[in-house]
Image (cartoon, rainbow, N blue to C red):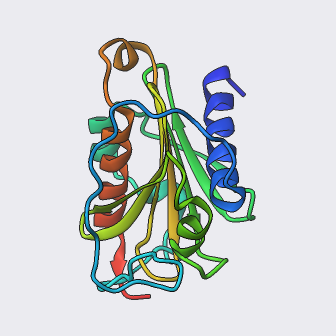
Amino acid sequence: MTSALRRVSAVVTCGLAAMLLGACSQRTHGDPAPTTTAATSTTSGAPKVSNPKNLKAHDACQLLTLSQLQALGAPATGKERQSTWGEKSCVWGNDEVNIGFSPDTTHGTGLSAVYANMSGSENFLPMTIAGYPAARTAKQTISCTLWTAPSDTQVFLVDLSVLGAKRANHEDPCALAQKVAEDVLSNLSVGQ
């Protein structure tokens, strides 16, 4: 495993720990203002999804198209991994960007667990991505962790790090992570 992919694995692990344990506290820089998501919410405060999409019907490494990966500056082929919770995940990495994508269709809690465990953290920022509820749970100068709910029972994690020229050019890792989430949502089928 290359050092870049090891860094992505550490970020993905930290993102999972942040969701489940409220761990991996990281300092934020220049946080954007929160975006209102929906009028109704779950008991945890997570917004309900009004137009659910089915994440479970897709292979993790096939959820970004070649043109989407090229636009992100990522390699054309991802490497399949297994998430801590036992689902297939995917990592795309090179000298410019590392993208970790981990779907969770097994717990059945959607964004509720993220809200329950991260609300109140200085890193927690509720937002809407392409009309779907999401939350940023970690942001550093070169990395960002976002959770997005395509349905009330499903969620996916995007952990992204900028490297090389992207880092040198101060590209915003959260803007790129949001682009990944938008791209994934555009590729999902409607329905649970």
Q: Looking at the image, is 63 positioned above or below residue 95?
A: below
Viewer can see residue 161: no
Q: Is residue 159 left or right of residue 15?
A: left
Residue 103: give x, y in percent of width and height. Answer: 56, 64
Residue 73: give x, y in percent of width and height. Answer: 34, 30
Q: Who is closer to the viewer here, 138 or 173?
A: 138
Q: Who is closer to the viewer here, 164 or 21?
A: 21
Q: Is residue 184 left or right of residue 100?
A: left
The C terminus lies in quadrant: bottom left
The residue under the point 32% across, 70% down is 132
Q: Is residue 187 left or right of residue 77?
A: left
Viewer can see residue 16: yes
Residue 83: give x, y in percent of width and height. Answer: 70, 56
Residue 76: give x, y in percent of width and height. Answer: 42, 39
Please count the marks in the image: 0
Which quadrant of the structure image shows residue 168? top left
Q: Looking at the image, is 53 positioned above or below residue 177?
A: below
The residue under the point 69% across, 61% down is 20
Which residue is the extreme one toward the front?
Answer: 120
Which quadrant of the structure image shows residue 8? top right
Q: Who is closer to the viewer here, 104 or 88?
A: 104
The residue under the point 54% across, 51% down is 121
The N terminus lies in quadrant: top right
The residue under the point 47% across, 82% down is 152
Q: Looking at the image, is 163 positioned above or below residue 155?
A: above
Q: Looking at the image, is 131 positioned above or below residue 158?
A: below
